[in-house]
Image (cartoon, rainbow, N blue to C red):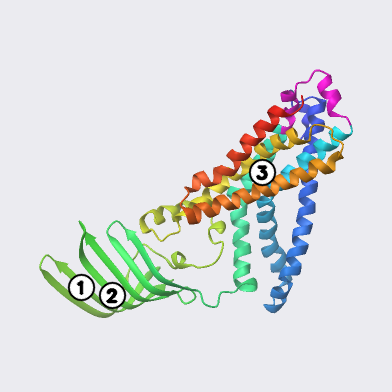
Amino acid sequence: MNWARIPYLNTIDRYIIGKYLSTFLFTMAIFTVVAVVFDVSERLDDFMKHDAPLSKIVFEYYAGFVPFYLNMLSPLINFIAVIFFTAKMADQTEIVPILSGGMSFNRFIRPYMVAATIIFALNFIFSVYIIPRTNKLKVGFERVYVKPVTNNTKSSTHMQIDDDSYVYIDNFDNNRKVGYNFVLEKFDDGEMTEKLMADRIQWDSVKSNWRIENYTIRIVDSLKEEMIKGASMDTLLDMTPRDFEVYDNIFTAMNMKELNARIEKEQIRGTGMMTDLLLEKYKRFVTPLAAYVLTIMGVALSSKKVRGGIGLSLGIGIALSFTYIVFIQFATMFSLKGGLPPLIAVFIPNVIFGVLAVYLLYKAPK
């Protein structure tokens, strides 16, 4: 981008934006190398044990690993980058003449916010559109070469498939797409009108329907009851084998269309996954806002020259960055285990650190 063509950016603005983005990219490159080296040392035995091809390791696993973890650590990387180059500017007495020349502190922050907006836009695009696609590659690779699930069976599943129909499956084997001890109950105005019980239910991928075997249907009509038995029959049900998947991080591999469709179904079915789904959805939109919060905080902390040099400011920045990540994890756990609404949970870290950023900005020497 040619910063000289943007009319409201002067030479100092372009200098700060260039420093910001170059330091951010350099820090991200360092974190990428360190993360990949540590992960290779940890996963090498798994790769060799399951004979993972090198091409799949590079173009599937690490093609998903690198974007996922860089996006997750982006607040930490962003904060460190801001503090590092701003503290260096302060240590080299570059900020004092800028402010002494008549530029207000609020005006001094403008190029930081321009750069933060670029990082916010990139994080948003990656979170919503790119990372779900790369996560599909990573999760698919892990299922085969890192953590192959030998017993991919989900037990005791209760599910509501529409307003009046409820399903229970004792065990569902996702490898074979077969469920055992299947029960389907239908209600009308709170009274059960039909109950189907079957020994086995099998997904037919060719016909995209279910085949029910050794079934009994009990039909209730007022005081009359009718029993129907059969060996097998095909039927359509608003559920698929994907509803019984037990893999880790499955929601992170869904694009927004798939995620919203799963949320709509979960509102009816109530299988206990709603909090996980909403957390994943809201994080994709809210987490990129950390670029603004941590940029303001970083400038406020490091714009003053101190005796300890950039080391002190950098140490404080790293400590606060990890504190921010810990807040995210605590809020997530409170939502999953303590009933905290997911939307509030994803906003809490940004709100708390946003208030702290405004306070530090107010106290910053101007």
Q: Which mark sits nearer the N-terminus, 1 or 3?
A: 3
Of 4 and 181, the residue lying toward us:
181
Give the residue at mark 1.
Answer: 218
The residue under the point 46% across, 52% down is: 339
Give the residue at mark 2.
Answer: 197
Residue 103 colored in magenta in the image? yes
- Badge 3 amino acid: Leu
- Badge 1 amino acid: Arg
Mark 2 Cα shell of 10 Å, populated few (<14), some (14-19), many (≥20)? many
Corner quadrant of residue 214:
bottom left
The residue segment tinted magenta is: 93-112
Give the residue at mark 3.
Answer: 122
Q: Give SS at disc 1.
A: strand
Of 338 and 256, the residue lying toward us:
338
Q: Is residue 102 left or right of residue 193?
A: right
Residue 227 x, y percent position in the rendering: 18, 76
